[in-house]
Amino acid sequence: MLSGTISMGTFAQDKIIDAFKQSYSLEKNENFKGAIESLKAVYQTDSYELNLRLGWLTYLAGQLPESEDYYSKAVALKPYAIEPKFGLVLPLSVQGKWTETEEIYQRILQVDPQNSLVNYRLGLIYYNRGNYDKADPYLEKVVNLYPFDYDGLILLAWNKLNLQKSRESKVLFQKVLMNNPDDPSALEGLKLIK
């Protein structure tokens, strides 16, 4: 009796693996609809992996509400996982849902406060809103973690300039030039300081 149960479980798992294999092949050929359908044929609402993969495929297919739904299910199934939260911000940000995107990033930082990508993106969101005071600690963290990273340095330099911290921004713009000599953005920033 037990071996029959194991065989049926193995058969079902093999079907799921085959569906994943087919979905990757179809995705490679940009047949997102087919890739989605191959997984929907074996869909289980309590499968983290299926919801995560369907979140990605529906995102690629431009089905943003569906993508958001699948990624949300994956987040609910693995609440401490960072992976589905990064997926969820894709359809949210494309739809301009910046408040929800910000909330997801904050949830990631609760699990991984040193995550440089999330700190950078939150800093960028606040910078783009003109909320330089709020952007500053996130960008500071990025540059503390990666002191010679171009993106972190240039954004922090401009943020400091907007905070009217000329001395700090000058030092940062000069570091940018060490990283990327003749960088037009850094040169422009330095002209504004002098």
Image (tube, rainbow, N blue to C red):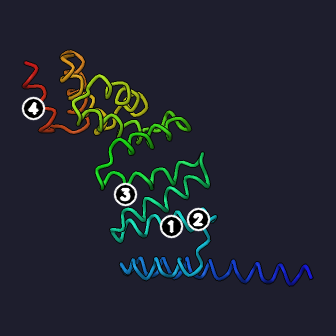
- Which numbered disc covers residue 49? 2
The x, y position of residue 144, in whole percent, is 41, 27
Image x and y of residue 84, in percent: 51, 54
Q: CA distance from mark 3 to mark 4?
A: 34 Å
Viewer-side residue, 69 vs 129: 69
Real-space Cα distance between discs 1 and 4?
43 Å
Specify which label sits upstream in the sequence, 3 or 4: 3
Residue pointed to by mark 1: 53
Amino acid carrying mark 1 in the image: Arg
Amino acid type for the residue under numbered disc 2: Glu
Q: Please tell me the numbered disc located at residue 188.
A: 4
For image coordinates 42% across by 63% down, the residue present is: 67
Q: Are marks 1 and 4 in contact (CB under 8 Å)?
A: no
Residue pointed to by mark 3:
91
For the residue carrying disc 3, how many other residues have a C-alpha within 10 Å: few (<14), some (14-19), or many (20+)? many
Q: Nearer the viewer, residue 130 or 151?
A: 130
Compare marks 2 and 3 and give the one earlier in the sequence. 2
Q: Residues within 10 Å of mark 2 (few under 14, many from 20)?
A: some
Helix, strand or loop for disc 1 = helix
Classify residue 150 by image quadrant. Answer: top left
Q: Quadrant of the N terminus?
A: bottom right
Q: Earlier in the sequence, mark 2 or mark 4?
A: 2
Q: CA distance from mark 2 to mark 4?
A: 47 Å
**Residue 59 x/y as whole percent:** 38, 65
Q: Report the front residue among 90 and 45.
A: 45
Query: What residue type is disc 4 on?
Result: Glu
Q: Mark 3: which secondary structure? A: helix
Q: Secondary structure at mark 2?
A: helix
In the figure, is residue 117 to the left or right of 190?
A: right
